[in-house]
Amino acid sequence: MKLTMLFSTPEELISQIKTLPSSPQLMQRMMLLLDDPNSTVESLVEVIQLERSLAARVVHLSNSPIYNGGACGSIEEAVQRLGYATVHEAVMTIMAMETFSKSLRVYGCSTSVLWRQALATACAARDLARRTGDDVNQAYTLGLLHNVGMVAVDRWVQQRQPGVALECGDWPEEWQTSENRLLGYDHAEPSAIMMRTWGFPAQMIEAVKYQFRPQAAPNASGLAALLLTARWVRRQVCVRGVVCALPDPEVINLLGLKAADLSPVVQKVAVEVEVLAKTLNIEQVHATV
C-alpha cells in the first residue's frame, strides 16, 4: 500500500493512543526498589504479587540454567537463592514480554521476533555495561524497552491507514527511513515519551531518544552509545547469515571500548538468548531486523 504522510507530533501520537502498555509502570517500581538501600525481600515479593501469575512465571524463569540457581519453589526462595538483582532481572524480562504481547502488523513483526529482539538487546546492553562500568540494571531495562514506541506507532498507524506496511532497511537505518517517510520521525521519539510517562529516570529517557545518534545526546551520550551498540549485537544475533558493518568508531570510543571487544559479546549473547528463549518457550524464528 502506498504511504501517505501522516501529520502528528510524537506527543500527539502518544496522547491519541487510548491505552498504553501498563507493564513498564511495574518495571519502574522494581527499579526504584532496587535503588532503595532500605528495600527488603518482603517489599520485592509484595510488588511481584501485584500481578496475577507473575510470581509463578518469575520462579520458572529463575530456574533457567542461565541463572545456575537450582530449583526454586517460590519468589521468596528465588530471592534468597539467586539474589535480589537476578530476580529483578527475571521480573523485568517477564514484564517486557507483556509489553510486546501482540504482533505489530505495520512492522510485520510477530511476538516471537519482538521478544527475541528485546532479550538480545537487553543481554547485550547488560554485558556491555559490565565492560563500561555503567549501571547494569538500567542497561538491561533499556535493552528491553528501547523500541517500545513501535507499539504506539503500530496502533496509531493501523487506526489511520489500515494496511500500511513499513519496510526495514539495512543496518544501521532499519525502520528509520520508512518511519520518517510516513511520520516525519522515527520510533525513538515515541519510545522516549512513553518512558517519561511511566516515570523512568531522565538519563534513560535521553538514551532512548538519542539511540540512533548518541553523539547528539546532551547528557547521556555514553548510555545512548551503549544502546546503539547493543542493537548492533542484537542484529548480529537475531538475523542469521548477515554480517553488519561495525558501529561508528566514535560510538565505540564513547564506550571506551575497541571493535575487538564486541565479538565476545555477540558470542555470549547468542548463547544467553537461546537459553532464555527455550525457558520462555519462544519459538525459533528467522528475523529480518
Image: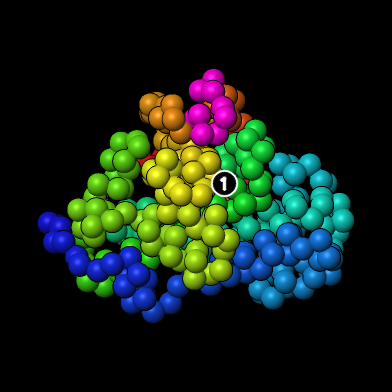
Residue sitting farthest toward the bottom: 18
Residue at horizontal 28 percent and vertical 56 percent from the top: 185
Quick check: 161 above or below 111? below
Location of residue 241 in the rendering, given as x and y in whole percent from the top left corner: 40, 27
Residue at horizontal 81 percent and vertical 61 percent from the top: 37
Residue at horizontal 15 percent and vertical 58 percent from the top: 3
- Residue 70 in view in this figure: yes
Circle count: 1
Q: Residue 55 sits in which quadrant?
A: bottom right
Q: Amino acid at mark 1?
A: Ala
Residue sitting farthest toward the top: 260
- Asked which secondary structure carries label 1, the reply is helix
Location of residue 147 in the rendering, given as x and y in whole percent from the top left corner: 44, 54
Residue at horizontal 66 percent and vertical 68 percent from the top: 29
Quick check: 157 above or below 179? below
Q: Nearer the viewer, residue 157 or 16?
A: 16
- Residue 271 in view in this figure: no
Q: Is residue 35 left or right of residue 205?
A: right
Location of residue 133 in the rendering, given as x and y in whole percent from the top left corner: 67, 38
Label 1 Cα crowd, 10 Å radius (few <14 / some 14-19 / many 20+): many
Magenta region = 252-260
Check the picture and name the quadrant holding the N terminus. Answer: bottom left
Location of residue 26 in the rendering, given as x and y in whole percent from the top left corner: 62, 69
Q: Is residue 235 left or right of residue 256?
A: left
Q: Nearer the viewer, residue 57 or 84?
A: 84
Residue 257 sits inside the magenta stretch: yes
Q: Nearer the viewer, residue 117 or 60?
A: 117
Check the picture and name the quadrant holding the C terminus. Answer: top left
Residue tagged 1: 122
Q: Residue 204 sits in which quadrant?
A: bottom right
